[in-house]
Amino acid sequence: MGRKALAIAMATVLCVAGLTLGGCSDESGSDSSGLEPYKIGVVVSLTGSYSGLGVPEKRAIELEAEMLNEAGGINGRMVELFFEDDATDAAKAAAAATSLIEREDVIAIIGATGTGQTMAMRTDIDRAAVPQVSMAGGSVVTADFDELVFQTPWPNRVVVPFTLKALAAKGITRIALISDSGGYGADGHDVVLASAAAAGVEIVADETFNLGDTDMTAQLTKMRSQSPDAVLMWTAGSEAAIVAKNMQQLGLDVPLVGSPGNGRVEFLDGAGSAADGFSFAAGKILLPEAYGEGSEAFTVATEFIDRYTERYGTAPDIFAGHAYDAFLIIADALGRVDGDVTPAALRDAIEATDGLIGVGGTFSYSADDHNGLSETDLVMYRVDGGQWVLDE
Amino acid sequence: MGTVAPRIRVVLLAAASLVIASVPFLTDDRYLLKILTFVGLNAIVVAGLALLLGFAGQISMGHAAFFGLGAYTSAYLTTAHEVPWLLAVAAGTLLAATGGLLLALPSLRLKGHYLAMATLGFNEIMSVLFVEMRGITGGNDGLSGIPFPSIGSLVIDSPAAIYILVWAVAALAFVGAANLVRTRPGRAMRALHGSELGALASGVNTVGLKVQVFAVSAALAGLAGALYAHSVGFISPSQFSLEFSILLVAMVVVGGTGSLTGPFIAAVALTLLQYVHALIPGLSKDAAALIQDWEVDISGLVMILTVIFVPGGLAAFLKRRRSGAGVEGEIA
Amino acid sequence: MGSAELLQFAVAGLKNGSIYALVALGFTLVFGSTGIINFAQGEFFMLGGMLAVFFVKLGLPLPLAVVAGVLATAVVGLAFERVALRPRRDSGPLALIIITIGGSMVLRSLSRHAFGGNELSLPAFTEGPSIVVAGAAIERQALWVWGLTIVAVAGLSWLYSKTKFGRSMRACSLSHEASRLMGIDTARIVMVSFGLAAVLGALAGVVVAPLTQTSFNVGARIGLKGFAAAILGGLGNPIAAVVGGLALGLVESMSIAFISSTYKDVIALVLLLVVLFVRPEGILGRATREKV
């Protein structure tokens, strides 16, 4: 009776799963010195819709931890990583945080990839008082302030005013805004509306689209009737390339300006010739020479880029950069802790981060700034012949 | 109900209850308790959906939206207006029930796939509203800092206590559903499932009954959603998507329509499968990561294989097929 | 608002609408022979695009890669029917629908395992600037979308009304048992209809990929739009699927033009619900009487 066997097998699996009481008793900590390794949890989206972001993040952290351990670790202790996939699902991110804190007893958590997933972990982070360094860019991550939570990407509240001022400096003041209705787009949208006046620009059209939409000519046609000086687009996914191509199709011949989320080769591939002239603000990781060749920041960035490219065969994208920075911040803080390394001591050390040179910029945290980046970490890029070049 | 010796049923039921009730005394693993709380929450929704789909023969692909309606209502009332927890949960449940009623009234003249589309459309509409009604829902950023359940000065904040709360509600939901099925409205429901014209001919108020079952089922989803919000402390729109609605329907069908036990087991199994990498003891980190990478495939395959090899759903293993009435749901 | 603008909105709506229509045709085809909704239809759309990109990367010229992508998807569709659906083909529709849901999860996830999580690009079929008609600009690839839609709907209508095979399919949709008694090989009909649905879905995916790029998770959303289009028009009839698709596309673009881009999907869905409440079998659907 094949069916019966199947049922019995399924029931067994269920029982085993249901009655599992202990955790995964995994003893793979690579401690040569006999000292306990520092346990760091990492929550990333390896499956689900953010998997394109989460995979490079995991790679960067794995690579850096490996290198750190080979060089002898921190204070003579190794770093042991525990990865959890949140499947781009907030409930799973919350469960992952519980697992890392309770079962693995981690002293810090890096993650998550997305803003919603980052926020979902907060209940556990607060209860266990474990510091969290998020790679998600949503303003809410640090605007809804929590003394345990830090973030590495350039936040919209820094990038948007920088971008708008750069436009105003070029005499571009009538701006048509198009953004996605998802987390990244909606966040950027709100910051644009809030900071337009201060930057001296006027938002003459305000349109949105949904992630997964296949055509934005209707929105762009509507914008065209307002004869804007430029179209400002706030979105990070494949829809950005559609907007660029639709503008080309319509012959809407004004500059298209984007966000750091467009610093991806997938955008260049997708938009093709429509990307020419496209400009956006981002950190200097895309072109480290922006730091000035020979500077320390230049060396840090190029070494990471070379290392990553050699290992994985592709250059790191900005998400890999955010992950690099998150790991660097924790590793740096671990090295500065005096005495016992507890989550609380580590948190204090992270908050004391000052002038730490990462690939996304120079991080200086303080008691009321847990993002740590400023406009000086940004530059404007322009796409020329299918490649990023520095604007100006 | 059914032809299985009642004694075996009672023994099985008692054994299952004992296992479920003893969990918080056997472990203090917060992770396990959290996952098992998720299981209990899904079971509550499935109890209602099994009534609707399995006994009244009406499909809903919008139950994630009712779940979300309950979650947002209760979360908003407790965070923004400091409404007492019990009242807020009651409000969430009631609003979900009202939503169910309002959707059911026009929708239930639709049949099969057209009803599926209407409920699915409702889910999509609610998804947009959860994002756009930012003043209440917090938009994409979600609502955080949702307080733990509390009654008076008693705060239910330990994972074990939340587990017990959720499973007590789940037990009540199933006992209630089982009683409903056995009573006169239950028999009328089954008549409805068999043939609507037949039921109509035997004097059953089909429309009224369908609407009532739909509202009850939406209320249970809303109740589960409210409990969910207070047990995890954070909610955001993507948690109440169509994907979740579809998974819930799959739980009922894999479990076996026309049964409550089968869908219950399927809810347990399909929820745990999403966390299976962390529930098998002694796995190496690499093996756990590999399994985690393939969890969606595993869930999909289990759904397919169960439906292929276990006709009538898991329920068919626990009891002989009811004579006469088909176990299989006919929605077309 | 000028007439050129109005025309441009219509072009946008008709382009999206044709995409929805192509996916809706796949739904209608499978519904026509099995009475079920194939929740994996969107994944055929995804696979077509992803596999075509894969074959381009292997070095095949674009036309060959497109054909190879579509054929490979057809094989997947046939295999899915044969392995997963046929063993339970006499079950009620709910069981079969759950199998297609499970199938869509597996196909989507396998695609991510194979091709990664990022979006991939496919070159346009014919390069060149857009064509301007009466002030409205039309991308060249949109012409391919429309051409394919016309060919697909004409072909299916012909198949349904003029061929023995098509008549057998329609008989199948009414009753498998009666069809079998009449000597129709229902198993073959169902399998072929799945193969055809996979071809249609893949063609749609391939022709859309140059416009939008593609990735492992594009199937669910386009599947939903296609399903909505099929229901709006009325299940089981190719013309209705196209009417439903175009109507949906136009409602969306006109919502953007005159009401709100944020609420365009809500507006379209509310209209869909209203249509269903007034005409429970869709715009062109025929009422079926329940058998006692």
Image (cartoon, coloured by chain):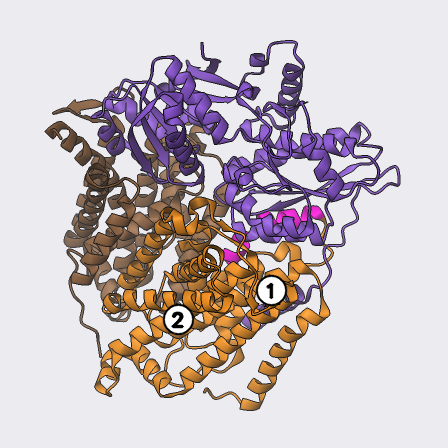
Chain colours: A purple, B orange, C brown
SS for dot 2: helix
C141 on left or right of C111: left
Give, as a single range, the part of the protein colored magenta.
B285-302
Residue C122 in sight from this viewpoint:
no
> Is A103 above or below relative to C208?
below
For residue B217, the mark is 2
For residue B36, the mark is 1
Q: Is residue B290 magenta?
A: yes
Q: Residue at x 72, y 54 (%)?
A: A24
Quadrant into which the C terminus of chain C falls? bottom left
Q: Residue at x 55, y 55 (%)?
A: B233
> Is B139 above or below relative to A201?
below
SS for dot 1: helix
A172 on left or right of A119: left
Residue A98's spot in the image, x, y percent? 65, 53
Residue C146's spot in the image, x, y percent? 21, 36
Report the magenta stretch's main SS. Answer: helix
> Residue C281 appears in which quarter of the rendering?
bottom left
Labels 1 & 2 near each other (Cβ < 8 A) = no
Q: Amino acid at mark 1?
A: Leu
Q: Is residue C213 magenta?
A: no
Label 1 Cα neighbours within 10 Å, binned few <14 / some 14-19 / many ≥20: many
Rounded to the nearest angstrom, the CA distance separating label 1 from label 2 is 22 Å
- Chain of the residue displaying label 2: B
Q: Amino acid at mark 2?
A: Ser
Residue A230 in sight from this viewpoint:
yes
Quadrant into which the N terminus of chain C falls? top left
